[in-house]
Image: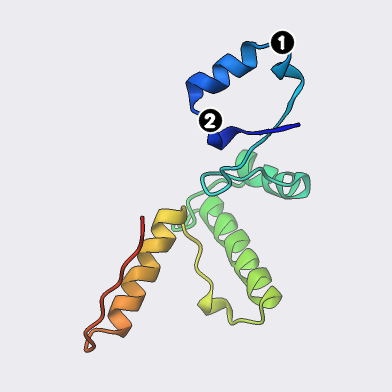
């Protein structure tokens, strides 16, 4: 039996967690829009950037240049994977920033048109 955690409120999940019968059930994380687990090979590839090469990519010192090189390498890899030009690849800090870029880009492209953009969120 599977319990979908996002369906129940925290208080219900706490009640279920205390129930000996329910504690044998398998839970499944369903909120991947908020955060997603990292694959092991991705984590291993990123460890040097969490521990050794963590400079600000906009800095001119060695750590910044090394970090910038890693970002540019990743940009090229993504571009190659989707048959794009690296200049078309942008990395954002999260979904909200990416959504804002999309909305602003749409608005800028449609400045002279009467356009109404609606979103259920």
The image quadrant where one finds the C terminus is: bottom left
Nearer to us in this view, 105 or 8: 8
Side (left or right) of 74 relative to 11: right
Q: 5 or 51: nearer the eye?
A: 5
User: Which residue corresponds to mark 1?
Assistant: 20
Give the class, few, some or many, for how many residues have Cα within 10 Å of label 2's Cα (few <14, many ≥20). Answer: few
Q: Nearer the viewer, residue 107 or 41?
A: 107
Disc 1/disc 2 C-alpha distance (Å): 18 Å
Residue lying at the far bottom in this picture: please name it: 112
The location of residue 116, given as percent across then percent down, is 26, 75
109 above or below 121?
below
Q: Does residue 90 lie above or below 67 as drawn? A: below
Horizontally, is 60 left or right of 39 in the view?
left
Report the quarter where the N terminus lies: top right
Instruction: List x then y, in percent, for residue 108.
Output: 29, 80
The residue labelled by disc 2 is: 8
Identify the coloring: rainbow
Q: Give the residue drawn at x 59%, y 33%.
A: 5
Mark positioned earlier in the residue sequence (1 or 2): 2
Q: Residue at x 63, y 16 (%)?
A: 17
Out of 90 and 121, give the one closest to the viewer. 121
Classed neighbour count for the residue bearing mark 1: other residues with Cα under 10 Å, few (<14), some (14–19), many (≥20):
few
- Please tell me the numbered disc located at residue 87: none
């Amino acid at each position: 039996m599977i319990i979908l955690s996002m369906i129940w409120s925290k208080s219900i999940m706490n009640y279920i967690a205390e129930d000996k019968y329910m504690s044998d059930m398998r839970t499944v994380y369903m909120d991947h829009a908020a955060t997603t687990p990292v694959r092991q090979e991705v984590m291993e590839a990123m460890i040097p950037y969490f521990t050794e090469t963590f400079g600000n990519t906009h800095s001119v010192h060695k750590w910044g240049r090394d970090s910038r090189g890693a970002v540019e390498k990743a940009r090229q890899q993504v571009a190659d994977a989707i048959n794009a030009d690296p200049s078309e690849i942008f990395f954002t800090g999260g979904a909200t920033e990416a959504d804002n870029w999309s909305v602003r880009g749409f608005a800028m492209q449609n400045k002279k048109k009467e356009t109404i953009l609606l979103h259920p969120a």
